[in-house]
């Protein structure tokens, strides 16, 4: 009996050895994850080349490992290589079509490529691509504030104002306490010429955060479009107090005073604008308007005419593409007469 038992035990040993070997084998998925984990440690240390090498090994072992594709995209995007980042994020989206993060990141990358493009065709191409993936991202996660906001921005840039408003409104619903969401929606309403709603949204934004000179400037500009210069003036003056080193509020303050025929105040505002910014083309243009207006009212004051013409020349030197100003300069420049013998 003992002899038979020994024979049985020896017979089992090859099977046990086989089981031990199979336990030590790793799957492609495990190999890929190991490379991915090492890549993250290297990336944290700033060794991006080695991290990318590990990620290439990871996706070679398991092409369906979406996080590895996405991590490579993150590195390329930080390096400013948006084209390569987009390819990696596209691969991540294909590997996992139901993951929000790579779709969102791909949309952001396409927006960056649109901003950096130098031709209108390229801009439109990348904006369309951004819209495509943002729409997919919102299907996956419809209550994401940033995705809705960015999608609205893409549609706005494409001139599709109704679609832009739809997603900007969604962003406001998702986060009604965001001043940024309200001001974005206001800009879209402005583009639609829905000025009353634009003012309402600017006000909503300013109620949440009063320290927004740019929003005040936009709101003031809308009031000017509505031909309400007195209300516009208040916003521009508030913006000037919040941004005292910016010449733009004073340029617009001068415009408001010109609209209400307060030429002395307009002159002071434009003078302040060019004092803050000696390269303020609108400031010099405004000075010329005030001086020439006073000259027209009293054409004996040729010194005012000369000051105005000099201001216009300065404005054109800074910003040559002002064809209407070129015509005004020609109109008011005295014609030289031939000397009498």
Image: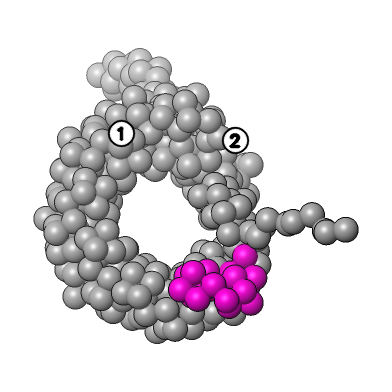
Q: Quadrant of residue 277?
A: bottom right
Which type of secondary structure does the marked residue at label 1 adopt? helix
Residue 20, percent across and down? 40, 27
- What numbered label is drawn on residue 256? none
Closer to the camera in the image, 255 or 294: 294
Residue at the spot 57% in from the left edge and 39% down from the top edge: 81
The part of the chain drawn in magenta is 291-309
Residue at the spot 19% in from the left edge and 63% down from the top edge: 199
Q: Which residue is mark 2?
A: 53
Q: Quadrant of residue 157?
A: top left
From what the image shows, is residue 9 above or below residue 310? Answer: above
Residue 66, percent across and down? 37, 33
Q: Is residue 146 visible?
A: yes
Q: Which residue is mark 1?
A: 131
The mark lying in front, picked from 1 and 2, is: 1
From what the image shows, is residue 144 above or below residue 181? Answer: above
Left or right position of 219 against 40: left
User: Dividing the image into 4 quarters, which one contains the N terminus?
Assistant: top left
């Amino acid at each position: 009996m003992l002899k038979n038992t020994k024979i049985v035990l020896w017979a089992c040993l090859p099977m046990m050895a086989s089981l031990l070997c199979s336990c030590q084998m790793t799957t492609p998925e495990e190999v890929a994850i190991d490379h991915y984990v090492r890549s993250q440690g290297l990336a944290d240390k700033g060794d991006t080349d080695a991290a990318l090498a590990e990620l290439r090994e990871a996706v070679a072992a398991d092409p369906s490992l979406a996080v590895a594709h996405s991590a490579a995209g993150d590195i390329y995007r930080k390096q400013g290589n948006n084209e390569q980042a987009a390819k990696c994020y596209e691969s991540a989206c294909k590997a996992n079509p139901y993951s929000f993060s790579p779709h969102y990141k791909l949309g952001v990358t396409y927006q960056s490529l649109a901003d950096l493009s130098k031709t209108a065709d390229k801009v439109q191409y990348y904006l369309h691509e951004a819209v495509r993936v943002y729409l997919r991202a919102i299907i996956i996660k419809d209550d994401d504030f940033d995705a809705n906001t960015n999608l609205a921005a893409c549609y706005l840039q494409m001139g599709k104002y109704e679609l832009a408003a739809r997603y900007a409104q969604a962003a406001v619903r998702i986060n009604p306490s965001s001043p940024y969401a309200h001001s974005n929606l206001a800009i879209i309403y402005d583009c639609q010429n829905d000025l009353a709603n634009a003012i309402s949204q600017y006000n909503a934004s300013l109620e949440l955060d009063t320290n927004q000179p740019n929003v005040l400037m936009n709101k003031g500009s809308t009031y000017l479009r509505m031909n309400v210069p007195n209300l516009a003036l208040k916003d521009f003056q508030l913006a000037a107090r919040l941004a005292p080193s910016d010449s733009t509020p004073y340029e617009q303050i001068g415009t408001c005073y010109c609209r209400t025929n307060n030429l002395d105040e307009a002159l002071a505002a434009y003078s302040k604008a060019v004092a803050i910014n000696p390269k303020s083309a609108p400031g010099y243009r405004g000075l010329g308007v005030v001086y020439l207006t006073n000259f027209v009212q009293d054409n004996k004051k040729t010194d005012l005419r000369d000051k105005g013409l000099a201001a216009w020349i300065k404005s054109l030197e800074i910003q040559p593409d002002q064809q209407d100003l070129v015509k005004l300069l020609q109109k008011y420049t005295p014609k030289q007469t031939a000397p009498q013998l």
